[in-house]
Image (spheres, grey):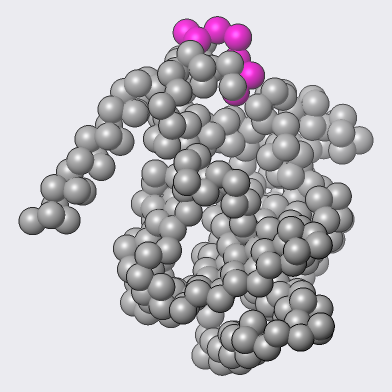
Amino acid sequence: MKLLLTDANSGGHLLLLNDEQHFDHFFYGRDGTNKYFTIVWNRGDQQRITIDGEQFDFPQQTILPLMFNQSFSFERSSDLTAWQFNREFYCIIDHDSEVSCVGFLFGIGTNLFINLDEASQQKLLLLLNMFVSELNTSDHMQNDMLVMLLKRLIITVTQLAKSEYIPDMRQQNERFNIIRKFNLLVEGNFHNEHSVNFYAQKLNKSPKTLSNLFALFDQKTPIQLIQERIIIEAKRLLYYTDKSAKEITYDLGFEDPAYFCNFFKKHTSFSPIGYRNKKETEKREEITISGE
């Protein structure tokens, strides 16, 4: 089942996919213009999900939020329920709150696999049925009703994520919001800004204060997060595009291809070309196995 609502005035899209045989998203390619945020619920057995060329376990009865610029595919998409929406439907780019597109679910800078207990499963199933009903009801209130339902879904999933990933309620304060805002700044500027100083100035903090804050929350250091985001993007470009290593060097704000090559190899143990060849070999092997 695939249901779609399009707001002709705003260009907003809301999609609900349930038990679809073919569900994936390729940002660098077919779906580059569909900048959909995704909340996907695995209602079946544990399966594999491939995110930007890397495989992860997707446990049973788990929810996973995915950013619009992530590419992903599933081992068994027919076991999934997914909600997809763009900023035009729900989010305002500069609206920074916990339940917006720059909130906890989509601004934490890591993949959140959120476990669902029985009560949470029933709550989400009720929401799913309400979405189906509203998407099949075409009237002047449909858009407003679906925006309210989507906000309710995001709030519910956010609460579950926080209880799992930040169990100490005392940590849900402005200090943690600084980490969230740092990740959002990195997401918007990593192509050109690679130094902690830049982000510290934007947050009106010193680099040392930022480092101490990240250590307090058992996070990676600020420079590690910046470099990790650059590597993720480099891997995406190598895996999903035909851009040369030299083109990727300049795309990611490096001036010297040799320096970028050494930077990439330091973090992955592969040269850019070596990584691309490795992934192409893996894809061929998967195709061979699936065809047997």
Q: Looking at this view, is 172 or 61 the one in front? A: 61
Magenta stretch containing residue 256, yes or no?
Answer: yes
Name the residue at 41% across, 78% down. Answer: 19
Name the residue at 81% across, 50% down. Answer: 93
Magenta stretch containing residue 259, yes or no?
Answer: no
Q: Looking at this view, is 179 or 187 the one in front? A: 187
- The relative height of residue 254 versus residue 156 in the rendered view (above or below) is above
Residues in magenta? 252-258
Name the residue at 24% across, 40% down. Answer: 282
Q: In the figure, is residue 66 to the left or right of 272?
A: right
**Residue 61 pos. (x, y %):** 46, 78
Q: Looking at this view, is 287 or 167 the one in front? A: 287
Instruction: Please say whether residue 71 is visible from this viewpoint.
Output: no
Q: In the figure, is residue 111 to the left or right of 271?
A: right
Give the quadrant of residue 101: bottom right
**Residue 82 pos. (x, y %):** 53, 71
